[in-house]
């Protein structure tokens, strides 16, 4: 029964190590200033709008009809 204790301690150490990794990632994520976040969101929005407009102009078939074989 001693190996159960060792297995339990190893599992506890694994959970603790995972928590440390998550905490570090969260600290890195929160390190952005509000101005940096706004700038990044504006850039992403501009890219999304540009991509949506060009993607809609190039579509010629109704959705779903190009993938199906004729019957």
Image (spheres, helix red, strand yellow):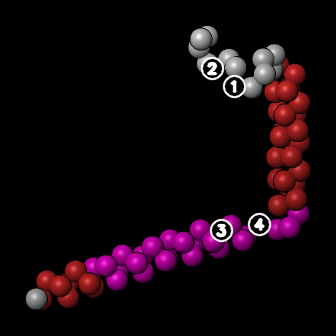
12 left or right, relative to 46: left
Percent x, y for residue 18?
Answer: 45, 73
Q: Quadrant of the C terminus?
A: top right
Part of the protein shown in magenta: 10-35
Asked if disc 2 and disc 1 are in contact, CB closer than 8 Å, the reply is: yes
Percent x, y for residue 45?
Answer: 86, 46
Which residue is at the far top?
70
Quarter of the figure with residue 23: bottom right
Which residue is at the far front?
71
Quarter of the figure with residue 48: top right
Q: Main secondary structure of the magenta part?
A: helix
- N-terminal of the pair, mark 1 or mark 3, is 3
* Disc 2 to disc 1, C-alpha distance: 6 Å
Asked if disc 3 and disc 2 are in contact, CB closer than 8 Å, the reply is: no
Asked if disc 4 and disc 3 are in contact, CB closer than 8 Å, the reply is: no
Report the mark closest to the observer, 1 or 3: 1
**Front in this rendered view, residue 67 or 21:** 67
Report the mark closest to the observer, 3 or 2: 2
* Disc 3 to disc 2, C-alpha distance: 43 Å
* Residue placed under numbered mark 4 in the picture: 32
* Residue placed under numbered mark 3 in the picture: 28
67 left or right, relative to 50: left
Q: Secondary structure at mark 2?
A: loop
- N-terminal of the pair, mark 4 or mark 2, is 4
Instruction: Identify which residue is drawn at 31% across, 79% down.
Output: 11
* Residue placed under numbered mark 1 in the picture: 64
- N-terminal of the pair, mark 1 or mark 4, is 4
Mark carried by residue 67: 2
């Amino acid at each position: 029964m001693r190996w159960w204790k060792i297995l339990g301690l190893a599992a506890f150490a694994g959970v603790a190590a995972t928590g440390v990794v998550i905490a570090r990632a969260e600290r890195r994520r929160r390190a952005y200033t509000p101005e940096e976040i706004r700038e990044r969101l504006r850039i992403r929005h501009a890219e999304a709008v540009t991509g949506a407009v060009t993607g809609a102009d190039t579509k010629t078939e109704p959705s779903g009809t190009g993938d199906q074989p004729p019957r």
